[in-house]
Image: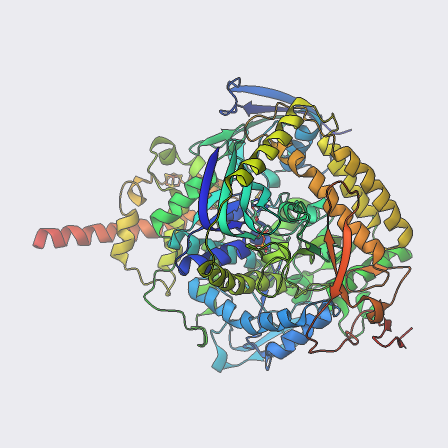
Amino acid sequence: MGRELTFHIFRYDPEDPDSIPHTDIFIMEEKENMTLFIALTQIREEQDPSLQFDFCCRAGICGSCAMVINGRPGLACKTLTRELPKEITLMPLPVFKLIADLSVDTGAWFRAMNEKVGSWIHTSKKFDPSAREERMDNALAEEIYELERCVECGCCVAACGTANMREDFVGAVAMNRIARFMMDPRDERTEDEYFEVIGTDEGIFGCMGLLACEDVCPKNIPLQDQLGILRRKMGWNTVKHLFRFGSS
Amino acid sequence: METVWTDLLCIGAGLAGERVAIEVSTAGFQSICLSIVPPRRSHSSAAQGGMQASLGNCCMGEADCPDTHFQDTVKGSDWGCDQEVARLFVETAPEAVREMAFWGIPWNRIVPGKSVYFKGGKPYEKTESEENEGLITARGFGGTAKWRACYTSDGTGHTLLYTMDNKVVELGVTVHDRTEAISLIHDGETCIGAVARCLKTGRLRAYLARATLIATGGYGKIYRESTNAVINEGGGALIALDTEIVPIGNPEAVQFHPTGIVPTNILVTEGCRGDGGTLLDVNEERFMHEYEPEKAELASRDVVSRWMIHHIRRGLGVKSDHGDHLWLDIRHLGAEHIKTKLREVEEICNNFLGVDPITQLIPVRPAQHYSMGGVRTDKDGAAYGLKGLFAAGEAACWDLHGFNRLGGNSLAETVVAGKIVGKKIVAFLQGSESKYDTALIKGAVIKNQERIDGMISGRAGHENVFEIRNAMQDVLMERVGIFRNGKDLQKAVDSLQGLHEKSRRVGLRSNGRGANPELSLALKIQGMVRLALCVAYAALKRTESRGCHAREDFEARNDRDWLNRTLATWREGSDLPTLNYEAASKVVELAPGDRGYGVCKIISCDGEIIGA
Ligand SMILES: Cc1cc2nc3c(=O)[nH]c(=O)nc-3n(C[C@H](O)[C@H](O)[C@H](O)COP(=O)(O)OP(=O)(O)OC[C@H]3O[C@@H](n4cnc5c(N)ncnc54)[C@H](O)[C@@H]3O)c2cc1C
Ligand code: SF4
Ligand code: SF4
Ligand code: FES
């Protein structure tokens, strides 16, 4: 016999005029290797088919299923119930717009973020279909991949004090993205151009450096290092700008 | 009712859908992509191992060329593919990989000098040339003569999809995520868009388009044990079936991947074996080389999966609470290799199994993985039967995979087909004008609203949608799996017909308001059961073995009678699909022969029996 688990789940559907925010309680028996994906799917099928939540890959790869699990943002599909006490509280991620219950609109947020940071290779070159590819050092390719592993789950944003206080803060995920492109020789943007995007209070100077972001990142992206590098680079850039301003 | 107009409606924002949208937008037309999930969460992101293209840069891929890629692909398909399409595909793949590099993929690159690689558990040495330093490298995959799968660690699908969506953002292509197409709007001749349900609000919306593309990915979730994402329920295939005109090509061609982990069926990539991992049995001994002396663990997926089940049936599987399984061993590849080239695999094993693959064995068993079947198109990606309707990616049966897809050929297909079909759609748009019949549009929306109201009110009945879905998945899993036979297939068809009857009488238990998930499934269930019937019935009728379709009662590949492609359509009011057939390939560049792996038992085109 497994443990008896008690789920306290936040419920609210803004589309349903009869719905008010509240908590529902569901009880079920724990099974071997049970994940929150398995548990929530079972609750939906057997207890309440209206329960809304998001899963897609169920393998910790796509970033769909972030929620606040006993007070901590994480990916539900890769959270094993045996790592949790038998009282489990699930809340939707803060910062993002609520769709219903545990489901939030990360899609709109990340599209806006990607637009804001210009998340693509900026180049004046044209692709030549007949030419061989440009060379790249494998070690550099691996370094870029390291930062590229972010799955846009939103955990780092939900855990961030600044992001919870100010809506316009871009979050660690955006700074990591900028760091990824700064490292990529194919991107022709200058430091000044990057500075315009994140050299502000909405960006690196809004960050309080408490690193809740890195703690919760399910992909273990080295956010601390990236924030540190950006802070130094952008700090110097500010000095440069002040100097230029003063001398002109 | 909200109505949205566009030039191209892309149903699906995975790699295929987005690549088409990019091509069409670049040509100055407007495109809108729909997706159930935010585009970057599409299942393309879960692809791990690699993308095939014959760049021939690395030493193990030396002298590779489109011709060799072509031969591997046709043999892999067991001569079920359309050879003209396969040719087009292999010729375009290298450019597709390079273009993705130009857009930002951090492909792994060649490091010059000596290094060790593993084959069959034994170490060998290879030397990369100085001259090719920094060019895109590749790894070995099953059923290929050369190392040809370009990769970024084992997150290839992820980097491809992020880079593709970056391009979409750069070009400002509109994506309506959390929007699910639930039926096509057509008059029996031309498709003019789709009715979709918003998965934020639950409201219906009509999308009107001069061209409509189905790029909804695979439909593995009609099976119980599948590596596919939970959203891979065949939304595109079933709205096509619903037209009564557009056929599903080769629905019976379903691929099982050798290494789904037990119990969750999460995939660990073929790259594990490509990089030298081995399969072990209960005695922790290798067995694949006994069955396949030449290719061993790296025969094609259909062949490896069959031998694994065969070996388990001989009593050599490992017993567990979740049924018998085998082991995948990558320990000898070493910590450094695993931590750089097989990172997702390491994470998945740690997380979902509590297994450290650097020191422990990974429990694996074949699981449903890929749908070779799909919306049948011609070589331009135009769907059979309706003007203005196209399909690309896993959702399509463009048909370069025939009865078995090679690992790495699917990512390549999405990008290549996206380029080619995208161009054809541009040409189509240049020559088309928009004519919208308002009564037709209104009719389509009202019909769907009535379906929804009926399910909410319980007018149709009170069948539980989850129970029907689960029963359907069990039937396919148990009777339409890796090995098939007439008796089981007939039983499957009978049970599915019963479920089809029930699917007419679904009633919701919840109130169906907003983006209600029970309603989402209820809207699809009848189509899913029909799709399942297409798979089972086409498998029953195909009395031969070819690629993934292995009949215990018809063991030979029968080129005399079955060198063809199934075309399944559904007539309203019927309880079985209508099956028609067309020649597998109009152009035959490579005549049918022995694949070089697997059991070779063939009834040749002129009726000669080979290898019986
Ligand atoms: C675990 C795994 C690993 C794999 N590894 C490899 C590999 O290493 N190499 C390789 O070549 N191939 C691999 N494959 C196969 C390959 O990843 C897929 O075939 C390919 O990515 C499919 O791309 P797609 O664009 O056709 O579909 P998807 O990426 O699945 O996209 C489908 C899109 O359609 C949308 N959609 C679906 N239904 C609807 C609807 N009704 N309305 C609106 N939108 C809808 C979805 O939201 C999504 O945006 C792997 C597959 C799996 C499952
Ligand atoms: S370190 Fe910066 S980005 Fe990270 S959580 Fe703290 S404030 Fe947010
Ligand atoms: S940086 Fe980590 S926590 Fe933040 S979105 Fe990316 S994967 Fe999620
Ligand atoms: S469902 Fe994809 S990360 Fe959890």
Q: Determine the residue positioned at 76% across, 50% down.
A: B534
Q: Nearer the viewer, residue B139 or A109?
A: A109
Q: How is the image coloured?
A: rainbow
Q: Position of residue B99 (x, y in %)?
A: 46, 67
Q: Determine the residue positioned at 43% across, 62% down.
A: B104
Q: Position of residue B481 (x, y in %)?
A: 80, 52
Residue B159 visible? The answer is no
Residue A94 visible? The answer is yes
Q: Nearer the viewer, residue B592 or A76?
A: B592
| Horizontal side of residue B476 vs A147, given as left or right | right
Q: How many marks?
A: 0
- Classify residue B375 by image quadrant: bottom right
| Horizontal side of residue B478 vs B16, given as left or right | right
Q: Position of residue B133 (x, y in %)?
A: 48, 76
Q: Determine the residue positioned at 34% across, 60% down.
A: A122
Q: Is residue B41 above or below residue B103?
A: above
Q: Nearer the viewer, residue A67 or B100?
A: B100
Q: Quadrant of the C terminus of chain B?
A: bottom right
Q: Is residue B436 above or below residue B308?
A: above
Outermost residue to the left: A248
Q: Position of residue B578 (x, y in %)?
A: 77, 51
| Horizontal side of residue A204 vs B207, given as left or right | left
Q: Nearer the viewer, residue A105 or A225?
A: A105
| Horizontal side of residue B586 vs B597, given as left or right | left
